[in-house]
Image (cartoon, rainbow, N blue to C red):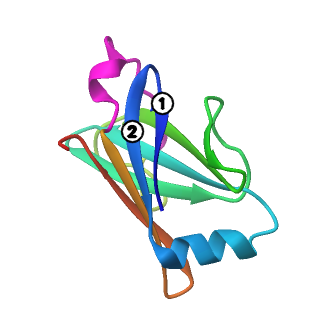
Amino acid sequence: MHSQIEISGHCVEVDLSRAAQRALAQQEQVVFAEMELYFSCLIRKKVRFYDSQMAVDIVYVTDKLGVSFRPVMTKVCGTNYEGDEPPLTDFPIRKAEKFIPKWLKIDFTNGEWCGDFGFVS
């Protein structure tokens, strides 16, 4: 399934694999996909999936899939933290519209949601 959503005034192309479409059809609750752009000692992009609404600015692709975009940064840079990652905080970006992804791809493989997003069409 191919569709378009608008985030902060910019068009994002969303592609759902057939497996993702089947998995969404079987869901009782909404699945939320958050496109996370991570700024720290490095830059990383990751799609995180939640079964409850974590973000405020949700855009619905279908009645079972909500999408958001969240730029984040680490509270501290270094290795003195517990867990897999350092604590994150929202990253206040000037002209955030320049960082909105152009596309999002979502799949459901081996019983898990996976996704990717990018900035070049």
Q: Residue 39, percent across and down?
A: 29, 36
Q: Residue 100 carries which label?
A: none
Nearer to us in this view, 38 or 8: 8
The image shows residue 58 at horizontal and vertical percentages of 62, 36
Q: Is 71 above or below relative to 2? A: above
Residue 12 badge: 2
* Marks 1,2: beta carbons within 8 A: yes
The magenta span reads 87-101
Note whether residue 32 is visible. Answer: yes
Q: Tell me the quarter of the image containing the C terminus.
A: top left
Q: Does the magenta stretch include residue 109?
A: no
Under circle 2, the secondary element is strand
Query: In which quarter of the view is residue 50 placed?
Result: bottom right
Q: Marks 1/2: CA distance? A: 6 Å
> Horizontally, is 65 left or right of 9 in the view?
right
Amino acid on which the number 1 mark rests in the picture: Glu
Residue at position x 49%, y 76% from top? 18
Q: Extreme front residue here?
A: 2
Quadrant in which residue 12 is drawn:
top left
Assess disc 2: are there few (<14), some (14-19) or many (≥20) residues with their C-alpha within 10 Å of its C-alpha: many
**Kind of residue at disc 2:** Val
Residue 32: percent from the left, percent from the top? 62, 52
Depth check: 23 or 90 in front?
Answer: 23
Looking at this view, is 52 or 103 the one in front?
103
Give the percent coordinates (x, y) of residue 37: 35, 40
Disc 1 element: strand
Observer able to see residue 75: no
Mark nearer the N terminus (1 vs 2): 1
Q: Name the residue carrying label 1.
A: 6
